[in-house]
C-alpha cells in the first residue's frame, strides 16, 4: 500500500539517476572549462579564408613548417616563402615534414613524398600538393585556406630577405 504515494518506484529511480548524473556531469564541465581557459586559443581563418600562421622571422631559411591544427604548411627557401595544402593528393591523408628527410613532406598513409615546392618525389601520389595564396601582413605570414593558386602565380609566394 505504501508504494502508491503518487510517485512510482520507477520515477524515483529515474530521478535519482538524473541527480547522480548531474552531480557527475557538473564537476566534469567545470574541469573542462578550466582546461579550456588554460589552453591557447586556436587560430582560425577569417571569413575570407586568411589564416595568420607565424612571424616570417621565426621561419628559418630552407625549412618546412606544418601549421598546427590546419591543413597548411609553409616552405621557405632562400628568398621566398610558399604555402601548401597538406592534404595528400593520393587519398587525402595529411602530409607533414618528413622525419627522415627534412627537405620533404611525407604522407603517413602510403609514404608519398613531396618536395618543398609540393611536387611529387615518390608515389603513389600522382599530383603535386596544392599551392595556396599567401601574403605578409605586419611581419606575419598569412595563408588563404580557400584560395588555390598556380605555381607561377604571384599570389602564391612572398619575397623574404
Ligand atoms: S593518402 Fe597519401 S600516399 Fe596515400
Image: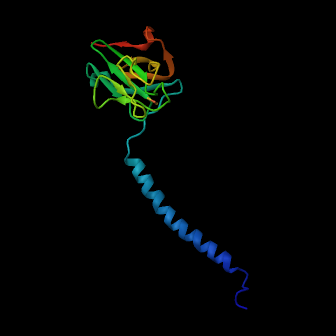
Q: Position of residue 148 (x, y in %)?
A: 50, 18
Residue nearest the viewer, comparing 95 with 150: 95
Q: Quadrant of the C terminus?
A: top left
What residue lies at 39% left-to-right and 13% top-to-bottom?
157
Residue 57 appears left or right of 4: left
Residue 125's quadrant in the figure? top left
Tell me, what colour scheme is on the image?
rainbow
Q: Is residue 139 visible?
A: no
Residue 16's quadrant in the figure? bottom right
Number of marks in picture? 0
Q: Position of residue 143 (x, y in %)?
A: 43, 22
Task: Name the quarter showing ligand 1.
Answer: top left
What residue lies at 36% left-to-right and 23% top-to-bottom?
74
Q: Is residue 14 visible?
A: yes
Q: Position of residue 25 (x, y in %)?
A: 51, 62
Q: Position of residue 17 (x, y in %)?
A: 58, 71
What residue lies at 42% left-to-right and 18% top-to-bottom?
134
Q: Quadrant of the N terminus?
A: bottom right
Amino acid at each position: 500500500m505504501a508504494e502508491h504515494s503518487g510517485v512510482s518506484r520507477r520515477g524515483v529511480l529515474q530521478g535519482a539517476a538524473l541527480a547522480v548524473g548531474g552531480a557527475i556531469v557538473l564537476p566534469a564541465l567545470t574541469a573542462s572549462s578550466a582546461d579550456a581557459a588554460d589552453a591557447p586559443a586556436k587560430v582560425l581563418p577569417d571569413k575570407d579564408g586568411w589564416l595568420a600562421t607565424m612571424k616570417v622571422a621565426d621561419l628559418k631559411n630552407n625549412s618546412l613548417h606544418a601549421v598546427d591544427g590546419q591543413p597548411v604548411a609553409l616552405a621557405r627557401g632562400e628568398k621566398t616563402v610558399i604555402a601548401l595544402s597538406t592534404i595528400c593528393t593520393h587519398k587525402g591523408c595529411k602530409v607533414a615534414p618528413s622525419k627522415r628527410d627534412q627537405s620533404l613532406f611525407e604522407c603517413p598513409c602510403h609514404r608519398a613524398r613531396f618536395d618543398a615546392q609540393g611536387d611529387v618525389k615518390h608515389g603513389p601520389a600522382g599530383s603535386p600538393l596544392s599551392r595556396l595564396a599567401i601574403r605578409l601582413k605586419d611581419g606575419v605570414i598569412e595563408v588563404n585556406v580557400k584560395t588555390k593558386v598556380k605555381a607561377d602565380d604571384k599570389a602564391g609566394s612572398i619575397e623574404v630577405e
